[in-house]
Amino acid sequence: MREQRDEEHQFQWFRKISEAHIDAVLLLNPKRRVIAVNHQWKRLMKTQATLTGAPFDQWVADKDKEQVQAAFSKLSGGKSQQVSAQLVVAAHQVTVEITFVPITKGTDVTAVYTVVKYMSLETSKEGQMINRTGDDVLTELPNRRLFIERLEQSIEAAIQTEEQLAVLFVDIDRFKVINDTLGHVLGDLALTEITKRINECLCNSEFLGRMGGDEFILLIPQMDHLDEAFAVAESIRDVISLPLDIEGYEFTLTSSIGIAALPQNGTNAETLIKCADAAMYRAKANGAERIQLYSAEMNRGFNEWFQVENDLRKALEREEFELYYQPQFDTRTKALTGVEVLVRWHHPNNGLVPPAKFIPIAEETGLIVPIGEWILRQACKQKKRWIDEGYPEIPISVNLSLRQFMQKNIVERVAEIIDETGIPPHLLDLEITESVTIDLNRTLRILNELKQLGITISLDDFGTGYSSLQYLSIFPIDELKIDKSFIDGIGMSTNNEAIIPMIINLGHTLKLQVVAEGVETKEQLDFLMKHSCDVVQGYYYSKPLAESEYDSFVKRRHDR
Ligand code: C2E
Ligand code: CA
Ligand code: CA
């Protein structure tokens, strides 16, 4: 009974994590038989069967069976193993990379989390066929120039008949990540599918063009009311967010859509496109999956993307950024164990701007690189000052954005700042997110080099991204931060609550410190303590504090 419950638990945890995974994943027992598989695996194998109990070896090409078994048998050492092999799927073979991650209890391997990364289709006619239509459909859409011509004609007609007209700018969120992760061929296939879906939302008079990359532009030539443009935008947004299935990879995309209307926002093609574009950026800045109508205020005020970009460029020299510090606590001893640095922007006209409003813009424009470097330098300087003043010697955690991490000389930059500020490297922790797994080899190399500087690495927002045990087990990281969305589920008897103990166990199996973030209530804290979470951070103990507030906070604790 107990055992069965355990296995059910294991299964739940597996489902949650593996279904978020972009690759095929299986949970195998120590005899290489299937405990559970994710959707991707069924897709890859073109089967709907549950497969429980099936031997994994049956799918491995004969010539590769031996080396797969050899890799598997090394798992008893506790380390994950990687092996390239061919799998037999229906009539053809696919080349894959298999990562076996042992799940251990004490020294026993209880199960093996198996990630199967699809590399290429060896002998399928299908694959070639899809690629060909992909290119055709992609190039079929009118380009910018054609679109502008058509728009100009429609504007003339609309002005004469005194009708309204709308231009919609549609941009796929984070599409670059998909492209970089899956490669351009699959990225193009995704765009083809998106194009098809958008086309299905349209009626004959509407005109769709592609501005290049992942940007689409749509003309609605006659409208009685602006509501019609919103209705079309909503249906486009909705069809884009339906799951995509590209060559066995299932994922979802979201979009941001900007709308500009004639005559309110302009009476020529150039202006309307510019306005729709600006509205789209505004939508994106407000968080993905928004629809935004252009408004004149975007020209003047804070809201226009380019304005923010301009202001951001000046913010550094005008010293408008300030660092806040959010303490972290040991769940058992209640000792202060660390502090996360969070940036704040004092905008001259708009007051305090939260990071969610400008970090995405800084990311997209690349401004995050100089800003992030400033943050890192300031944080290290501050830490050094605190050490010199006799404050507790706890590490400081600084968020490192993807763009920063992708910088060519990131390791040298970090090393220089450590040197220059004199911070003891072991007191510097960098928080990265799963998005850095775009280029696995490079990421591994950079992480190892960073670790050699003597600093520690945390994996932030764990559970929200392209979560994967594969990365967890091979990355030289020290800490796992459970995303707030899971913590919010505590007391709600949701899946999110059930998964927390699994994440904690997983972290401990991999010898990582586990931090819960966004802890707001006693109930959440109790739950986390009960499940042996190591460290908590959240409003329950303290909001992020300005430097002076943090100072008095530490002194107050010290006096007690
Ligand atoms: P994050 O790294 O996940 O940071 C945690 C966020 O959760 C912070 O929001 C923090 O104020 C908030 N938080 C902490 N405890 C609680 C709680 O109990 N309840 C609630 N509701 N919220 C809590 P913040 O400061 O607004 O930052 C948002 C995001 O902006 C960060 O998420 C991070 O991705 C980014 N960010 C912030 N500062 C920096 C920075 O210096 N560099 C970079 N690259 N990104 C930053
Ligand atoms: Ca963080
Ligand atoms: Ca986080």
Image (cartoon, rainbow, N blue to C red):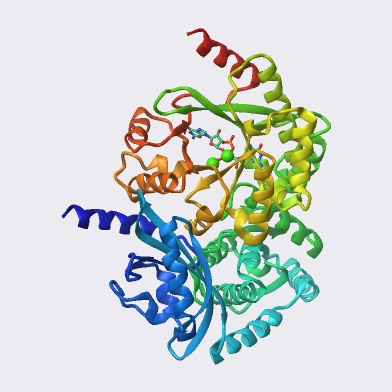
User: On the rendered structure, is 30 left or right of 258?
Assistant: left
Eyeballing the image, is 432 above or below 168? above
Residue at 64% over, 14% down: 390
Residue closer to the observer: 550 or 543: 550
Query: What residue is drawn where x is 60% and y is 77%?
Result: 189
Residue that lies at the very extreme toward the left in this rendered image: 1
Percent position of residue 62, x then y: 45, 85
- Residue 433 versus residue 334: which sits nearer the camera? 334
> Is the residue 471 above or below the residue 186 in the image?
above
Q: Please provide percent x and percent y for residue 479.
A: 52, 41
Q: Quadrant of the N terminus?
A: bottom left
Where is residue 25 shown, x and y percent of the image? 43, 67
Residue 293 position (above or below residue 491) = below
Residue nearest the observer in this picture, 456 or 196:
456
Q: State whether residue 269 is above or below residue 348.
A: below
Q: Quadrant of ligand 2?
A: top right
Residue 357 quadrant = top right
Residue under the point 67% across and 44% down = 452
Residue 46 at least partly seen = no
- Number of residue marks: 0
Q: In the image, what residue occupies the spot 60% across and 57% down? A: 437
Q: Is residue 412 rendered to the left or right of residue 81?
A: right
Percent x, y of residue 158: 72, 68
